[in-house]
Image: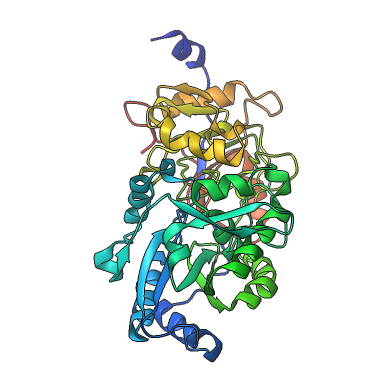
Amino acid sequence: MGMVEKILDSVVLPNMVLIRQDFDPSQIDDVPAEMIAECDRPEIAATILPGKRICLTAGSRGVDNIALVLKTLAAIVTQKGATPFIIPAMGSHGGATDEGQLNIIRDYNITEVYCGCEIISCMDTVEIGKTPEGESVFIDKHAAEADGIIVIGRIKPHTAFRGDYESGIMKMMAIGLGKQQGAEACHKNGLKMMARRIPMFGKTILKHCPVLFGIGLVENAYDKTCLVRALTPPEIISQEPELLKFAKSKMPCIKIPEGDILVIDQIGKNISGDGMDPNISGTFATPDVSGGFISEHVVVLDLTDETHGNSNGLGAADVTTDRAFNKIIPDVTYPNGLTSLSLNVLKVPMHVRSDELAIKAAAKTCIKGDRNNLRIVRIKDTLHLGEIWISEALLTEAQIRPGIEILSDPAPFAFNENGDLF
């Protein structure tokens, strides 16, 4: 037994209780039918002309139904006599390499076989114009050469700033389409200025590029598609802010707002741009934004396979495991931070041999809470909050809060012989 294990050996963790959090489950059951209906609107349908080559964008997030959306959209374009192709549109993600970005979308089943069209992954960009302030705006070379561009984006609150346009179609144009060079240009003045710069860059792209329309997707609190909306370029400008308000109303949350420790089983770029969505976890990279769960310590136990070694966001945790640490690939992680000018979320927290030691380390170092009656919340990740674990100290509060159902009796953490959670 090493010294860390000896120091933590006497720490007693509280019993945990499984609870269910209820949110609005409304969702779209037939996404292709909804896509077809939206694209049949005359002002949308008229933009797809026979013989034209049309670029479709694929982002780096684990968006519900994203492969199906692209497959359906490719079929619609083909049916109208045009030729679709897909590009990864994810700024500097995937280590800012052609193959890295291609690997990300393959994980989402965005393949040529499934989607029925060509996929071109390339980091080359071209300057398409300048902002009103004289700054160069860049987008993917193949998108710029296409006869038309259809931009697909999930609309939701951003992890580091607040504005009329956060994560969504406008950001997909300004940063996703821009590849590493364009994303870096947009981030030049830091996260605090992104609320102003994203629409400035996005509107420049709308002015100088053949953007036919955008597809805005919104998900409910269970990570399921609940809205599909096709937007003309003027509608992207006028309607995306309202769709963002709708998306915010559909966000999940931890219904118990405060505790001592938040344990997160896994983080990754497929979950959130910051690995774990700070709108849920409270782990914001900037002091300009607040919200989410309030805790003294955050423990992250693992990285998702789909993040491909990108540990962005791990620096917001206080403790992690050797398992997560050993998955970090600097060449995949660091381009993201260097491009966004945000290094604090790339830091490596204390890492220990097992899940049990990681949670015990957080418990031992809590100074604000009652160490004999710690308030702990454990979640799978920040996308899936339907069923979560809480410690006994939070049971009374859970019983009086609406929308919470107690599913189990209190029981100890279920660690295996290696000290990892089942």
Viewer-closest of 189 and 29? 189
Regarding residue 369, the answer to whether it shows in the image is: yes
Task: Say above or below: 395 vs 200.
Answer: above
Outermost residue on the bottom side: it is 42
Residue drawn at the location 73% of the way across and 45% of the way down: 192
* Quadrant of the image occupied by residue 96: top left
**Could you say which is closer to the camera, residue 67 or residue 226?**
67
Residue at the image point whose x is 72% and y is 58% from the top:
163
Return the x and y of residue 334 as percentages of the image width and height.
49, 34
- Residue 38 image offset from top left, x and y in percent: 50, 83
Name the image quarter holding residue 370: top right
In depth, the one of 166 and 193 nearer the eye is: 193
Left or right position of 143 against 75: right
In-image side of 297 versus 387 (left or right)? right
Q: Position of residue 71 (x, y in %)?
A: 35, 72
Question: Residue 402 at what x, y percent from top left?
Answer: 66, 61
Relative to 101, residue 261 above or below: above
Is residue 406 visible in the rendered image? The answer is: no
Which quadrant holds the C terminus? top left
Q: Nearer the viewer, residue 199 or 318?
A: 199
The N terminus lies in quadrant: top left
Whether residue 35 sits left or right of residue 114 in the image: it is right
